[in-house]
Amino acid sequence: MQSSDIRATQDSVLFESLKQDPFVSSILKKISQHEQPLGIRRQFLGTAVRLTKNMSPKLIEMVQHCKKQLDINIETELYVFAAPQYNAMCIKPENGRLMIAFTSSILKDFSLPELQFVLGHEFGHYKFGHHDIPVSYIMKAKPDPRLVLTLFTWSRYAEISADRAGALCCGDFEATANAMFKLSAGISNDLVRFHLEDFISQVEDMKTAMEKDIRQRMHRDWFSTHPFSPLRVQALQKAFESVLLESEGISKAQLEIDIEPFMNVMQQSYLDSQTDVAELMRRVLFAGSFKVALATGTFNQKEQHVFEKLLGEGRYGEQLDQARILSDLDERIEDLNQHGTLVQKSQVLRDLALIAVADNKVTKKERHALRDIGQALQIPVDIIEVVIQRRPMLD
């Protein structure tokens, strides 16, 4: 698999969408017209220490390893500056020279494999051109709320891509997870030891807390540029189980579907999102629910309950023209095929499977209905089968 293939699908899709957005493109045009030398290298040379092969041969060796793994060919300089925080940064190239800077604390307290993950992560931002969309600069121009949400959602997926680059360079899940823990906790000593299962268990408690305070979730989570660390570790764990890092692992397409529940913790569900694509997804879910439920002849009470749990109380009624709704399904699917991603379409199929499993059994006819919808949505057969064979649960 090529190094470019490790990039998260939603990172690529949202990246291209943002670059084509009129507001964003106008900002990028202004930047290109008035761009001045950043002068950051001059600042680093005056306030930090440039690390050479004589000073840190192991670190320079790691640089060469990461560049080879990620197919990167650019002159690179490393710097270290005194700071108590664990941090590293990749600076947009100046005059064909890429700069990566570390705090002194991270070089002192991280093991070599952990540093290799951090270094690969920073190279990942360069590899995938993440500097081309400067979120903080665009935010100063006061974009509309929908664009703001898209910017921050993209930024979180960009971090997933960079994490995968770090994982490819490191090749050791335990080291990557340890690095994420240290970055989150800010400590590295025997008093507190990393425990993977306990760290990830924070996610369930986090979900519970979010449900109790949806308003805080809207303001804090949807406008966060980085996924929560336990979520990133879960996403990395999945990446190590995939063909990206394991020759016999799950497919890239399946990986992207598997990480969506983690990412959705921090973003608005399509069921209540106000975006155009979310509306297309809901329209397919609405009509598709009738195709699945009526495959067995009737839309029973348990299926109605799940239907209303997904789409809202009172959405089902005997007065609905079921024949007309079914006749609209193909057109609704065609609209979603034009504007939705594979992951988004797979989310809809996943929720349609909830209708099928509402009475704790999935009939042969319901399976056929789900397969028909999945194929019409142009979802690969292997993913359709995974969605159908799982026993999805309502949140």
Image: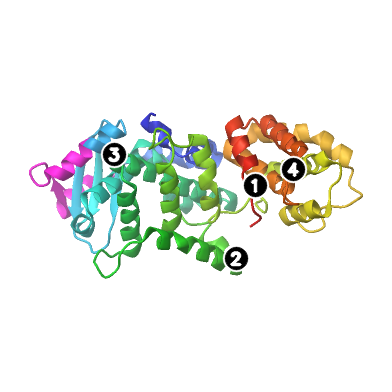
Q: CA distance from mark 3 to mark 4?
A: 45 Å
Whether pointer 2 and pointer 4 mark residues with C-beta atoms closer than 8 Å, the reply is no
Task: Please say whether residue 83 is one of the residues in the magenta stretch.
Answer: no
Residue 93 shows which numbered tag? 3
Could you say which quadrant of the image residue 75 lies in?
Answer: top left
Indicate the amino acid at tag 2.
Glu
Front residue (pair 252, 126): 252
Could you say which quadrant of the image residue 53 lies in?
Answer: top left
Q: Which mark sits nearer the N-terminus, 2 or 1?
A: 2
Q: CA distance from mark 3 to mark 1?
A: 35 Å
Viewer-nearest of discs 2 and 1: 2
Whether pointer 3 and pointer 4 mark residues with C-beta atoms closer than 8 Å, the reply is no
Viewer-nearest of discs 3 and 1: 1
* Span highlighted in magenta in the image: 38-64
How far from the left and from the top, in percent, is residue 260? 54, 47
Indicate the amino acid at tag 4.
Arg
Residue 283 shows which numbered tag? 4
Q: Is residue 228 visible?
A: no
Viewer-nearest of discs 3 and 4: 4
Where does label 1 land, which residue?
275
Q: Which mark sits nearer the N-terminus, 3 or 2?
A: 3
Badge 3 marks a residue whose secondary structure is: strand
